[in-house]
Amino acid sequence: MMPLASTLARVANDVQPCIECGNLDSASVCRVCRDIGRDVGIVCVVEQVADVWALERAQTYKGLYHVLGGRLSALDGVTPDLLSTEPLKQRVTRGDLKEVILALSATVEGQSTAHFIQDLLKESGLKITKLAQGLPVGGAVEYLDEGTLASALRGRKEA
């Protein structure tokens, strides 16, 4: 147990939030933000660091990230001032962005947070997009909930 405890203590001391995006790393600027192959004109806004890791596993997104640190929730007392929205606004005002992707949960709280961010950034003139919603890969239509099916039908595109 002592080697495990020692390793956990070292990780707790070494890992820190990235000063640019809020991702976790052992450096003050994370490996994603340091990657010169990234499209610095696109920022994907996520709720948690785990969302960054999930998107990175997909190996298709090559822009930057912004971690909010949660989502708005009146029941849980999470208000805009508890989220990392001001640093996002500052990133937008720097002028080097062309698109903000909202990759937030398809829950009431996630969608409320998305609307809040859209309102926050509406005067920036940036292209603001959100992830598509609908049928999961490998999902059988008969087992999907009504909300997912409705979203899939609304977001359909030509085959």
Image (cartoon, grey):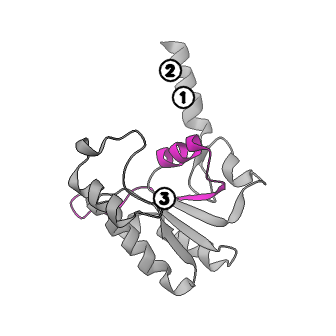
Please give the range of residues in magenta.
49-75
The numbered mark at residue 9 is: 1
What residue is pinned by disc 2? 5
Locate residue 9, reporting x and y percent. 54, 28
Q: Are there few (<14), some (14-19), or many (20+) residues within 10 Å of tag 2? A: few
Would you say 16 lies left or right of 81 here?
right
Q: Residues within 10 Å of mark 1 (few under 14, many from 20)?
A: few
Answer above or below: position of 111 versus 8. below
Q: Are marks 1 and 2 in contact (CB under 8 Å)?
A: yes
Query: In the image, what residue type sits under mark 3?
Result: Ala
Real-space Cα distance between discs 1 and 2?
A: 6 Å
The residue under label 3 is: 159
Return the residue found at the far right: 36
Give yes or no for residue 114 being in the magenta stretch: no
Q: Is residue 55 above or below residue 20?
A: above
Amino acid type, label 2: Ala
Most foreground residue, 97 or 79: 97
